[in-house]
Image (tube, rainbow, N blue to C red):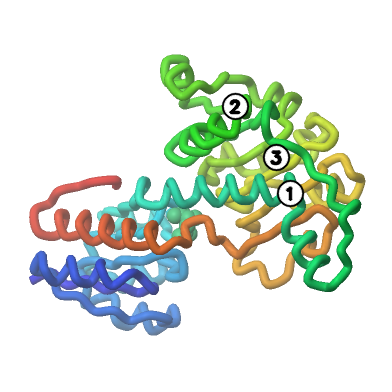
Amino acid sequence: MPKVLISDKMDPKAAEIFRARGVEVDEIIGLSKEELAEIIGKYDGLAVRSSTKLTPKILESATNLKVVGRAGIGVDNIDIPAASAKGVVVMNTPFGNSITTAEHAIAMMFALARQLPEADASTQAGKWEKSKFMGVELTHKTLGLIGAGNIGSIVADRAHGLKMKVIAYDPFLTEERAVELGIEKVTLDELFERSDFLTLHTPLTDQTRGIVSREALAKTKKGVRIINCARGGLIDEEALKDALESGHVAGAALDVFAEEPAKENALFGTPGLISTPHLGASTSEAQVNVAIQVAEQMADFLLDGGVTNA
Ligand code: MLT
């Protein structure tokens, strides 16, 4: 019977499915790197969210490991080249939390448009600063997407419901798909120049790292509002801080940071900044979805060799 370790907090559905499918499962959360390296040799599969970091060193001890399943989208916590070199298959669940993450981006957009966190703090402090919190409407504004894949396309759909004009920069988006999604496909420069709201929905790769750079920010409309529920390294945080302080960028809502957990960050306290602690996928529905998907996919692979989302 194959044996799987769940090493991050995951919905109980994952363990239930493994057991029901005939896969032995241990759930041990909060292991140190050394502890994980010590026990990983016993397992055929490892199921993680984002806390476990699968480094080359740990993989050295993973003598029986055949598959790593990431209950979520980003696989930044797994050293893919080192895993592939050992013949370990890495799978993610690209669809389970897409709606939830898209909804968080939309929530962030509303929060920016009406300065909800600041207005809440001020009201609860007894200030009643009605004239301080003048907002902007979303209707007829241009929303620029960097990335129109699983999550970006859902954001576009919801934005259409809000009567926004949606444009996107995405080298993988075909003209046909753009038409189907009601999105105008534009160049990156055009996206920066035209967006009233700019939202990122792309993985962090060598091509996308720092895509919202100082130069890019200089091309944006004065008063642009930026949302990032994708990955921290996509935005030059120092340049964003300067742009918020100068007032060129009217607001930024960040769920993700270059360094996480972001217990300290130079952006904290900057006027116009709204932040959440990487909550993009944090709904009960999404966590059930990704737990089910990762367990089904890993069980398929371990029992029958079936490969999905690798
Ligand atoms: C993902 O990659 O699935 C999201 O960023 C959420 C998470 O880290 O679990």
Q: Are marks 2 and 1 in contact (CB under 8 Å)?
A: no
User: Label 1 belongs to which residue?
Assistant: 252
User: Label 2 belongs to which residue?
Assistant: 166
Q: From mark 2 to mark 3, how far is it between C-alphas?
A: 18 Å
Label 1 near ligand 1 (CB < 8 Å): no
**Which of 296/99 is in front?**
99
Classify mark 3: helix, strand or loop: loop
Q: From mark 3 to mark 1, how far is it between C-alphas?
A: 12 Å
Residue at x 41% of width, y 82% of height: 31
Q: Are marks 2 and 3 in contact (CB under 8 Å)?
A: no
Residue at x 63% of width, y 62% of height: 276
Q: Position of residue 138 (x, y in %)?
A: 69, 35
- Disc nearer the start of the sequence (2/1): 2
User: Label 3 belongs to which residue?
Assistant: 212
- Disc nearer the start of the sequence (3/1): 3
- The correct choice, above or below, for 272 with respect to 45 in the image is above
